[in-house]
Structures are given as C-alpha cells and as structure tokens.
Amino acid sequence: MLVSSCWARISSRTCFWAELIRYAHGRAAARTLSIIKPDATRRDLTGQINARFEAAGLRIVAQRRLQLTRPQAEAFYAVHKERPFYRSLCEFMTSGPVVVQVLEGENAIAKNREVMGATDPAKADPGTIRKDFAESIEANSAHGSDAPETAAYEIPFFFAEVDIVG
Ligand code: GDP
C-alpha cells in the first residue's frame, strides 16, 4: 500500500516534469509551411535552398515533391483572390513541380521569412534565397507562412500530423 502510494507520487511528479519539458519544447520549436516554387525546382535548386534552411537552424521535418493542380493552387492562394496577379500566380505555381515542406525551429515563421528575404528580389537583402535565386517578384523561388494562423491553415493543407516527424 505504502509502496504503491509512493510510486503514484513519484510517477505523477515525473509526469509533471515530462509534460513541462514537452510544453516548453512545443513552444520553442514552432513550425512553418515552406514551398520551393517551380522556378527553383526547374533549375534544381532544392538542395541549395534546403542547405540554407538547415544552416539557419530550420529542420526539415516533412517534405514532398508534387505537381499542384489548378484547384489546389487557387485554394492555397485564395487569400490573394482579389489581387491583380492571382491568375498569373496560380498559373506559375502549377507550371512545374514544387517541394512542399514543414520547417521546425525556434521562431520558425520569422526565421524562414528572414532566410527567404523580401517578396520582390530587387528589394531582398543580400544572402537571402530570393535575392540569390529568384527570377522575378512572382517567380521568387520560395513561399513561407507569414503568421501562426497562416501556418495553422497551410501545414494541414499538405501534411497529416503523422507525416511530420520532428
Ligand atoms: P510573400 O508572403 O512574400 O510570398 O508575398 P505575398 O503573400 O504578398 O504574395 C504571394 C506571392 O504572390 C509572392 O510570393 C509572389 O510569388 C506573388 N506576388 C506578390 N506580389 C506580386 C506582384 O506584384 N506581381 C506578381 N506577378 N506576383 C506577385
């Protein structure tokens, strides 16, 4: 009786610390959705772009190469429906294979956008993916979620939880 109540107290404390560590890790290790766009896959830049993510501490915890269908591209970019470049963007995103991926790391969303650089490569900082690889403001080599709510929509758009292995 005494032994079992002692064990219950020890295991509930162990459980508490394990939960706390898991919680802290979950908070620190945020995730973001990244897409290597058709202009980059066409030039076989996937490896070079992935190396930049890893060098920046962004671990690739899920990855798949696929060809977006028109309805998929339209749904993914639905937020830009009213923008003048929407049709052209959807056309471009379906013009060749893309590599969709989940990146994980501390402040993953902001870190990824820093590594990608500004939307317009002409305005991107030196050493960023878009400065070094983008062909134009549209064919700008990489996509990254811009906020936690966006990542929460974009990650399940392509991946089930079991496909993401941290
Ligand atoms: P991002 O978050 O930096 O990707 O930029 P946005 O969310 O504003 O735009 C989404 C994507 O639309 C960009 O990554 C570009 O591929 C494309 N895009 C943005 N602005 C323009 C533009 O002015 N013209 C064209 N043709 N495409 C654009």
Image (tube, rainbow, N blue to C red):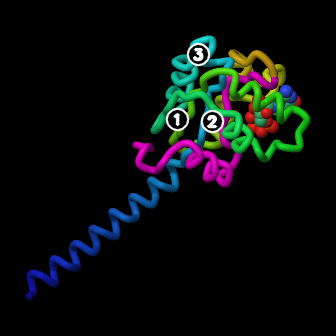
Tell me the quadrant of the picture where the C terminus can be found. top left
Residue 6: image location, x then y, percent: 15, 80
Tag shown at residue 16:
none
**Figure quarter occupied by ligand 1:** top right
Q: Relative to 13, is 21 above or below? A: above
Mark 1 residue type: Leu
Gap between marks 2 and 3 measured at Cα: 17 Å
Q: Give the residue at mark 2.
A: 112
Task: Provide residue 72's location: percent of width, then percent of height.
Answer: 66, 39
**How busy is the neighbourhood of tag 3: few (under 14 within 10 Å), some, or many (20 plus)?**
some
Circles 2, 1 touching at the beta carbon (< 8 Å): yes
**Residue 118 appears in the figure:** no
Where residue 56 appears, as percent x and y from the top left, is 55, 30
Which comes sooner in the sequence, label 2 or label 1? 1
- Which callout, 1 or 3, points at the residue further toward the start of the chain? 3
Tell me the number on the disc at residue 58. Answer: 1
Q: Which residue is farthest bottom?
A: 1
Residue 66 sits in quarter: top right
Q: Which mark is residue 45?
A: 3
- Disc 1 versus disc 3: distance between alpha carbons? 17 Å
In the image, the segment drawn in magenta is 137-166
